[in-house]
Image: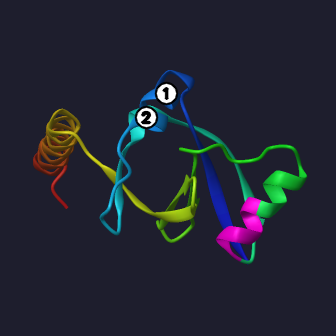
Amino acid sequence: MATFSIWRLRDSQQDKFRWAPQQSSATTPLKLTDYREDGSIDAEGVYEAWLSLRKDNRELRVGDVLAEDGGKLFLCKYVGLEPAEWVIADMDLQVARDAELQAAKGATVAQQENPA
C-alpha cells in the first residue's frame, strides 16, 4: 500500500489552469508555489486513492495532484490522472544553491574551529 500526498491547486490558479491549452507532452510541468498540501491518503494505486477521496467528499478537482511516496506525481485532468513533475524556477534554484553554499561554509568553519 502506498501513501499519496494530496496537493490542491490554489483557487487563484483554477481559472488559469482550466483555460490553459492542454499539454501534449507525456509529463506536465507544475510549479510548487501554485499548490498547497492537503494531507495524505493510503491506497493500493493512484485511481484507488482518487476513488477513496471521492467517497470521502474530498474529491480531486481538475488541477489537483496526488504525489506518491517515491516522488511520482499524478495531475488530475479532465481525461484522468496523468504524469507530472515539479519544476524549479531559476530564482528558486539560486536560493537553493545559496543555501547549500552557506551550509558548506558553516561546515568548513566548524571543522577548522574543532579539528578532530
Do labels 1 and 2 touch, CB within 8 Å? yes
Q: Quadrant of the N terminus?
A: bottom right
Q: Amino acid at mark 1?
A: Asp
- Reading the image, the residue beneath label 2 is 19
List x then y, in percent, for residue 81: 57, 63
Query: Of the residues shown, which amino acid type is indicated by label 2?
Result: Trp
Q: Is residue 19 left or right of residue 75?
A: left
Is residue 99 depicted above or below 75 in this figure? above
**Vertical order, 82 against 33 (above or below):** below
Q: Residues within 10 Å of mark 1 (few under 14, many from 20)?
A: few
Q: How many marks?
A: 2
Tell me what residue is drawn at x 35 percent, y 44 percent: 21
Q: Residue shown at 74%/77% (left/top)?
A: 44
Q: Is residue 68 above or below residue 40?
A: below
Q: Quadrant of the C terminus?
A: bottom left
Residue drawn at x 65%, y 61% as measured from the top left: 4
Q: Quadrant of residue 84 in the image?
A: bottom left
Magenta stretch: includes residue 42: no
Q: Which residues are magenta?
A: 45-50
Q: Position of residue 109 (x, y in %)?
A: 12, 42
- Residue 30 in percent (x, y) is at 37, 47
Asked whether 92 or 63 is in front, the reply is 63
Of 56 and 102, which appears nearest the observer? 56
Of residues 11 and 17, the one drawn nearer to the viewer in this rendering:
17
Q: Position of residue 100 (x, y in %)?
A: 19, 46
Numbered label attached to residue 15: 1
Answer with the quarter of the image where residue 80 lies.
bottom right
Question: Is 6 left, or right, of 75 in this rendering?
Answer: right
Q: Secondary structure at mark 2?
A: helix
Asked whether 48 falls inside the magenta stretch, the response is: yes
